[in-house]
């Protein structure tokens, strides 16, 4: 279950943690995981807490996939908590990009 925003008809949608829980409830023993949770749109701490809770609820059958991707500029802006402060993911992305430019 990968995270998608304003994608129209793409499976899983905007809440991979909810879809992961729903699919896991419908099974009894297989492992289930998120394809990608986009850290640039969420608090990494909140995502870690949510998936730790799911991991405990479903006896370790939960996997977490993380990523960083964007949508249209308008959708990206709408998803940000506070555009005036860089998020840790944004700072890391900027630092990595600067390092690539120096190489």
Image (cartoon, grey):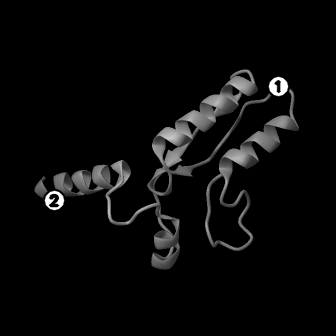
Left or right of 38 on screen, residue 18: right
Q: In x, y percent, where is residue 62?
A: 68, 31
Residue 98, by quadrant, is: bottom left
Q: Position of residue 80 (x, y in %)?
A: 47, 63
What secondary structure is found at the residue carrying circle 2?
A: helix
Label count reads: 2
- Answer with the quarter of the image where residue 51 lies: top right
Above or below: residue 75 compared with residue 4: below
Give the residue at the far left of this rendering.
102
User: What residue is shown at x 53% (from left), y 73% (from top)?
Assistant: 75
Q: Is residue 58 left or right of residue 72?
A: right
Horizontal and vertical percent position of residue 23: 81, 42
Q: Is residue 77 above or below residue 34?
A: below
Q: Which disc, if any, is residue 29?
A: 1
Residue 93 picture location, percent across and down: 31, 54
Q: Identify the mark nearer the N-term, 2 or 1.
A: 1
Q: Residues within 10 Å of mark 1 (few under 14, many from 20)?
A: few
Please report the residue visible at 22 percent of the width from the left and 52 percent of the height from the top. Answer: 95
95 vs 57, nearest the viewer: 57
At x 69%, y 32%, the residue is 54
> How busy is the neighbourhood of tag 2: few (under 14 within 10 Å), some, or many (20 plus)?
few
Q: CA distance from mark 2 to mark 1?
A: 46 Å
Question: Mark 2 — residue?
Answer: 101
Question: What residue occupies the far top of the structure in this picture?
Answer: 59
Report the residue at 16% width, 59% height from top. Answer: 101
């Amino acid at each position: 279950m990968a995270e998608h925003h304003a994608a129209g008809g793409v499976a899983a949608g905007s809440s991979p943690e909810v879809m992961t829980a729903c699919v896991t409830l419908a099974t009894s023993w297989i492992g289930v995981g998120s394809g990608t949770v986009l850290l640039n749109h969420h608090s990494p701490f909140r995502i870690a807490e949510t998936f730790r809770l799911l991991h405990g609820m479903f006896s370790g059958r939960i996997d977490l996939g993380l990523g960083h991707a964007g949508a249209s500029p308008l959708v990206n802006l709408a998803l940000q908590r506070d555009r005036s402060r860089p998020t840790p993911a944004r700072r890391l992305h900027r630092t990595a990009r600067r390092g690539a430019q120096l190489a």
